[in-house]
Image (spheres, rainbow, N blue to C red):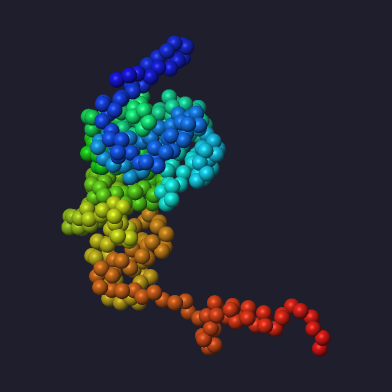
Amino acid sequence: MRYRYSKGPSGQLEKKAIIYTSDEHRIDPADVDTDAKIIIKKLKSAGFDAYIVGGAVRDLILGKKPKDFDIASAASPARIKKIFRNARIIGRRFRLVHVYFGQRVFEVATFRSLRDGHTSNTFGTIDEDVLRRDFTLNALYYDPEQQIVVDYVGGMNDIKKKLIKPIIALSEIFTDDPVRMIRAAKYAAIAGFSFPLNLKMKISHQSGLLSSISPSRLTEEIFKIINSDKACDIADLLDKMGLYCYLQPQASALMRKDAVFKNNYLKTMSKLKGEKNMRGDALGALFSDYLESTAEWKSGAIDNFKEVCKTARAFILPMNPPRFELEYAVKRFLAVRGITIKRTLPKPIHAAEGETPVIKRKRRRRKKKGTGQGNVTAP
């Protein structure tokens, strides 16, 4: 075990972080994504510190293979984009870089400072960046080249204790961003961690802050939940903590009133397989048990397909998925029950002539080309 020092306010060296070696953190290098290693190597070769951060480090320490690898670096977004041709800067206020390897995307962020608070977008040092993160289990930095884990906040011990502890003060952590309550529950359900009493009480008292979150952000969080292989555990814990009612109010209300519905709803969630879900199954899990308990869709579902979609959409509010995704999920729900919705062609505008708009445009182009329209000719 080693330590990292930096100058404190008085100018004297102070112990800032613990550095864990491979023998201590036990991360298997084979579990680290090869492309993530390439990104780290290129950034370091260009003279910038770079680390794998967040949930990926937590999962590696727990012996799991992460799905996503986020990276933090001292390099600015503009500099990162110059280093990687296959990169794109995203965001207006909080600028990040997406580095592409085929269909895969790696998010690379620049270290942020605390100059403007915990939601600051000003660049800083790793010492400042770590204090902007939400919980200690997500605030570890892993260097795959040196195979070291840098721990500023005691995250390694909290992971060993299976404890979720906030870094940001309790008086600020959820007022800054109420979605952190959802994420805390998600981490607890996925990793089997527990909450300190003061954190649990703070979530209970401030859960109402989630009512101010936009539908787009809630939609993003719900999609993360249903595309997890722990969707059932997450939804159940969120409901027990009084948070699921802000994500899925109608489902939460039914779960509290009807034990049979709750059992069926969670059972459906338990069948989800994360990224291996059949397309439409994850989204369909949110409304399938509700539709199953109503009789309206069963008679004339083909004729009333749009009404079935409206019923499903109304039930999963405030979640607002794209229309084509919802329609696909409803079709999948109906297909499993032996009802096929055939694809319908657009109604021709010129039905008497038997012409669709596409045919009409082609005919016009041929006519224009053949007659030399636009040229002046002698009578």
Q: Residue at x 39, y 37 (%)?
A: 37
Which image quadrant is residue 148 in? top left
Q: Residue at x 39, y 74 (%)?
A: 343
Quarter of the image for the N terminus: give it.
top left
- Residue 276 in picture, x, y percent from top left: 29, 55
Quarter of the image for the C terminus: give it.
bottom right
Q: Is residue 252 left or right of residue 111?
A: left
Nearest to the observer: residue 25 or residue 144: 144
Which image quadrant is residue 282 in? bottom left
Q: Residue at x 36, y 70 (%)?
A: 307
Is 155 situated above or below 71? above
- Residue 10 in picture, x, y percent from top left: 46, 11
Instruction: Report whether residue 15 is seen.
Output: yes
Nearest to the observer: residue 91 or residue 150: 150
Which image quadrant is residue 203 in? top left
- Residue 152 in picture, x, y percent from top left: 36, 24
Instruction: Report whether residue 296 is seen.
Output: no
Tally the numbered discs. Answer: 0
Is 217 situated above or below 153? below
- Residue 86 in picture, x, y percent from top left: 50, 46
Q: Residue at x 25, y 54 (%)?
A: 272
Q: Is residue 35 left or right of residue 28?
A: right
